Amino acid sequence: MQVREILRVKGNRLLTIEPSGRAADAVATMAAQNLGSLVVIEGGRMSGMLTFHELLQALAKRGGSLGELKVSDVMLRDPVTATPDMEVNDLRRTMLESGARYLPVMQDGKLLGVISFRDVAKAVLEEQDFENKMLKGYIKNWPA
């Protein structure tokens, strides 16, 4: 299974924020939309990622308040990315080795979407369930 298949099933819903945006507004958006990350877009191009991890670190450093802190002050610049033709096992390995829970999917400099660790786990589980059903059907219909 490739990343493009996960994106196709997941859909291409993508929420973004500008680096000049307020971190507190990012939290509000992420909470309202049940998201763990936002893509930071500047001049029509991805300039970074903002995830709950960076926001929690900022909250911890600032005594629980983000105040007027800007996205650019806490965002992850140059995040690890995936490609649509990447195999899921390679994607999982990349996510585990980098510690990234969210990976932007890029092709020829264009942002196609974001894959979360949950998306990967769901896709692998569904693939295994399908294979399991196929094998059970094969065994059930095996000639005696």
Image (spheres, rainbow, N blue to C red):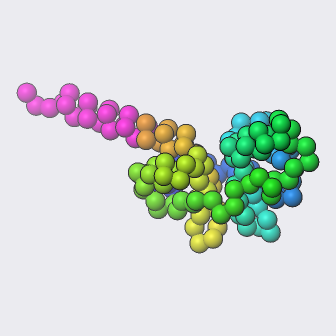
> In the image, what residue occupies the spot 73% across and 67% down?
45
Measuring from the top left, give residue 97's x and y in whole percent: 48, 52
Residue drawn at x 53%, y 53% is 98
**Residue shown at the point (77%, 67%) measured from the top left:** 44
Residue 96 visible somewhere in the drawing = yes
On the picture, is 61 further left or further right than 117?
Answer: right
Q: Position of residue 43 (x, y in %)?
A: 80, 69
Q: Residue at x 59, y 64 (%)?
A: 106
- What stretch of residues is rendered in magenta? 126-144
Residue 103 at x, y percent in the picture: 59, 53
Q: Is residue 19 above or below residue 144?
A: below
Asked if residue 91 shows in the view, the reply is no
Residue 128 painted magenta: yes
Q: In the image shown, does 42 or 24 lie closer to the viewer?
A: 24
Q: In which quarter of the image is residue 119?
A: top right
Q: Is 23 one of the magenta-colored residues?
A: no
Q: In which quarter of the image is residue 130?
A: top left
Rendered location of residue 68, percent (x, y): 92, 48
